[in-house]
Amino acid sequence: AQSVSQHNHHVILSEAASLELGCNYSYGGTVNLFWYVQYPGQHLQLLLKYFSGDPLVKGIKGFEAEFIKSKFSFNLRKPSVQWSDTAEYFCAVHNNAGNMLTFGGGTRLMVKP
Amino acid sequence: DAGVTQSPTHLIKTRGQQVTLRCSPKSGHDTVSWYQQALGQGPQFIFQYYEEEERQRGNFPDRFSGHQFPNYSSELNVNALLLGDSALYLCASSLEGRWQYFGPGTRLTVT
C-alpha cells in the first residue's frame, strides 16, 4: 500500500523567508504527485502536480516542487513567503494502478507579517 | 463554470442515525471520489464512482455507501453513525480519474 509522510507538522516563518516542506512517499511503481493547499475557511486547491517529464515543476503563486525519484521525495519550495501563504499544505500521491489519492498528514504554515 | 458543489454545508446528527451527503461534479467531469478529513489530519479516501459504479474503495466499513447518478452527481450515505464519523467530508471530481478538483466539503458532527 502506498503512504505519504510529511515531516513538518507546523512551520512558522517570517515574511520573505524561504520555505521548504518535505514530502516522502512509499510506492514502488509509477506515481503522480500533487501538492494541495487549504487556506483558512476555503476548500482544497491544487497547487501543482507532477506526472512525468521535468522533475522540477512550477505551480501557482510562485511555488515549485522537485521530484527526486531515488529519494521518493517531492518537496515543496518557495523562495520568499508572504503572509497570504498562511495555510495548510498537503502532499498527495496517485498511482496509475488505482484511482485514489493518498494524502500526507499536512503541514500547517503560519507566516508572520 | 461552476466547480464542485456539495450540500449541505454543515450537518449535526445523533449517534445511530443515518446521513446522506450530496455532490455535483465540475462541469465535464465524469468521476466522483469521496474523502473523509478528520480534524488535524489529511483526507482519507472512501471510494470512487465512475459510470454509476463503485470503482475503488478505501478502508472504510460497509456503513459507508454511495451512489452515482446518470448526470454524474453522487451521494454518500453513512448508516449507524458513530461519534468517530465526525469529520469534514470532501467530494472531488475528475475526468477519467486524472487530477481531482475538490469541493468545499460537508462538516458532519455526530453527538
Image (cartoon, coloured by chain):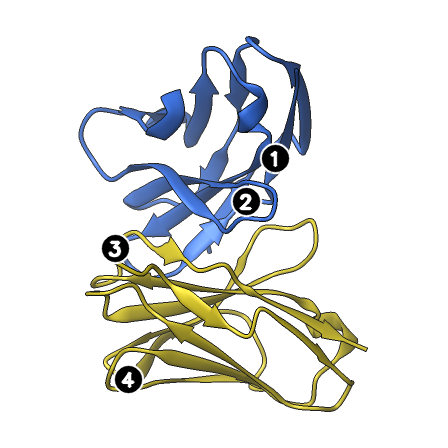
Chain colours: A blue, B yellow
Say what amino acid the circle numbered 2 marks: Gly
Check if mark 2's residue and mark 4's residue have beta carbons within 8 Å. Answer: no
Whole-angstrom CA distance, mark 2 to mark 3, is: 19 Å
User: Which label lies toward us, 2 or 3?
Assistant: 3
Which numbered circle lies on residue B98? Answer: 3
* Residue B7 or residue B64, whichever sits in front: B7
In this orientation, which residue lies closer to the viewer: B85 or A28? B85
Residue A111 location, quadrant: top right
Tell me how far mark 4 sits from mark 3, CA to CA.
Answer: 17 Å
Callouts 2 and 1 in the same chain: yes
What residue is shown at x 59% (from left), y 80% (from top)? B61
The image quarter in which residue B94 lies:
bottom left
Looking at the rendered structure, whether the residues under marks 4 and 3 are on a common chain is answered as yes
Residue density around tag 3, few if under 14, some if 14–19, many if 20 or more, within 10 Å = some
For the view shown, which residue lies furthest in the right direction? B111
- Identity of the residue drawn at 44% across and 60% down: B103
Q: Which residue is mark 4?
A: B52
What residue do we see at 35% from left, 29% from top? Answer: A60
Q: Is residue A47 above or below residue A55?
A: below
Q: Are marks 2 and 3 on the same chain?
A: no
Amino acid type at image mark 3: Arg
Q: Position of residue A2 (x, y in %)?
A: 45, 51
Q: Residues within 10 Å of mark 2 (few under 14, many from 20)?
A: many
Distance of mark 1 from mark 3, alpha carbons? 24 Å
Expressed as whole percent of the image width and height from the top left, the position of residue B109 reads 72, 72
